[in-house]
Image (spheres, helix red, strand yellow):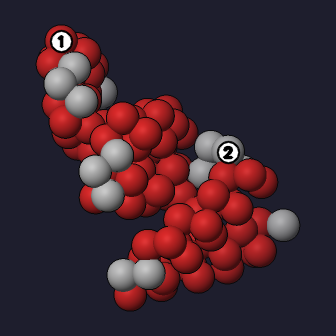
Amino acid sequence: MTNSIDEEFQNALEEHKKGNQQNASRLYQGILNIAPLHPDANHNLGLILETNGEAKLALPFFKNALEASPSTELFWLSYINSLIENQDISNAFEVIEQSRQK
């Protein structure tokens, strides 16, 4: 099963790189249906949502990515940026402080 998830993620990533956001979103969502805490699928789906002006919908995906892989600096940055985009400044400062402690 892991191979199929890895292969599906590579397919999603290729679609994402080509700018085929709808196909990439569908593929990332399929991965998350099987592995809801897949950090990269969560993160990349959050990126697509945020790019499409849906920052509120992106926030939980960034949070899931960060919780699944707290050592990945990019996930911290994306989550903090999403909090700021959502004008949730107090939580952004709180998460910044948490990131410093890590």
Disc number for residue 36: 2
> What residue is rendered at 22% in x and 20% in y?
88
Mark 2 to mark 1: distance in Å? Answer: 27 Å
Of the residues shown, which amino acid type is indicated by label 2? Pro
Instruction: Give above or below for 60 relative to 52.
Output: above
Name the quadrant containing residue 23: bottom right
Classify residue 14 as left or right of residue 50.
right
Whether residue 76 is visible: no
> x%, y% of residue 82?
26, 38
Residue 57 marker: none
Location of residue 91 in the rendering, given as x and y in whole percent from the top left corner? 25, 16
- Quadrant in which the C terminus appears: top left
* Crowd rating for badge 2 (residues with CA inside 10 Å; few <14, some 14–19, many 20+): some
Three-letter amino acid code at the position of disc 1: Ser
In the image, residue 90 lies at what x, y percent?
18, 12
The first of marks 2 and 1 along the sequence is 2
On the image, numbered disc 1 is attached to which residue? 90
Above or below, comparing residue 38 to residue 14 in the picture: above
Q: Looking at the picture, how far across and down is residue 92, in whole percent?
A: 20, 22
